[in-house]
Image: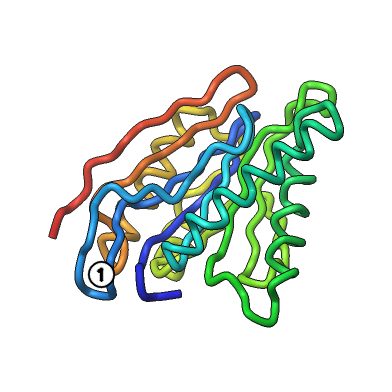
Amino acid sequence: MQINGGSVIAMVGKNCVAIASDLRLGNQALTVATNFEKVFPVTDRIYLGMAGLATDVLTLRERFRFRVNMYTIKEEREIEPETFAHLVSSTLYERRFGPYFIEPIIAGITSPAKGSKPFIAGADLIGCLNFAKDFVVVGTASDELFGIAEGLWEPDLEPEDLFETISQTFLNAVDRDAFSGWGAIVHIITPEKVITRKLQARMD
């Protein structure tokens, strides 16, 4: 879980969610790349972040894409965030005796039929789900992220305020972790649109 480094955080706002990850790919203390994204779109309203072993991140990205496409074809509707969280959980649990070394975070907005509510969840590497009302963190900087997020997060943040909060939390936390950092990318998901912004961070 520590070899490639990297961290991901998701936060809930007022009718919006934010998910952010760093861009570092490392081989322990050696930096290999500074453009390795760990957050991927699943649908227009759901994003998946994965921290852990880089090869498993890429493998599972394709596996989840395949399974979501199969769900969409079979059910003839878009997958809901909670349903996708259970799909992630069952996929990881299938391999519990030789697990994928990743911890996922799911962030999304439910469909208008379900009230366009914000949703976030995290899981461990064998798929034990953790549904949260405030924020979820995974990765090598998770202790630092927890501490700062508990200090800065407030309920019912508007999208711009949520962006500011998650950005400050993330940048301050990864500055204290040698295995994370080298820039960050933030996605703000609202019922109408997704706003994606890149953050400059310390490069040392």
Pick out the residue farthest to the left. Answer: 204
Answer few, some or many: residues within 10 Å of disc 1's Cα (few below 14, many 20 plus, some between 14 and 19): some
Looking at the picture, the colour scheme in use is rainbow
Q: Is residue 174 left or right of residue 201?
A: right
The answer to which of 172 and 174 lies nearer the viewer is: 174
Image-quadrant location for residue 5: bottom left
Residue drawn at (62%, 48%), measured in percent from left and top?
Answer: 106
Pick out the residue farthest to the bottom. Answer: 97
Image-quadrant location for residue 44: top right
Q: Position of residue 177 (x, y in %)?
A: 30, 68
Tell me the quarter of the image containing the C terminus: bottom left
Q: How many marks?
A: 1
Residue 1 vertical position relative to residue 57 in the rendered view, above or below: below
Residue drawn at (85%, 34%), measured in percent from left and top?
Answer: 74
Residue drawn at (46%, 66%), measured in percent from left and top?
Answer: 52
Q: Amino acid at mark 1?
A: Ala
Residue 179 vertical position relative to residue 67 in the rendered view, above or below: below
Mark 1 lies on a secondary structure that is loop
The answer to which of 139 and 60 lies nearer the viewer is: 60
Residue corresponding to mark 1: 178
Residue 188 vertical position relative to residue 133 in the rendered view, above or below: above
Pick out the residue farthest to the top. Answer: 192
Residue drawn at (33%, 50%), measured in percent from left and top?
Answer: 36
Q: Position of residue 189 (x, y in %)?
A: 56, 30
Residue 3 vertical position relative to residue 180 in the rendered view, above or below: below
Q: Position of residue 202 (x, y in %)?
A: 17, 53
The answer to which of 80 and 110 lies nearer the viewer is: 80
Image-quadrant location for residue 103: bottom right
Q: Is residue 26 left or right of residue 170?
A: left
Q: Position of residue 183 (x, y in %)?
A: 26, 48
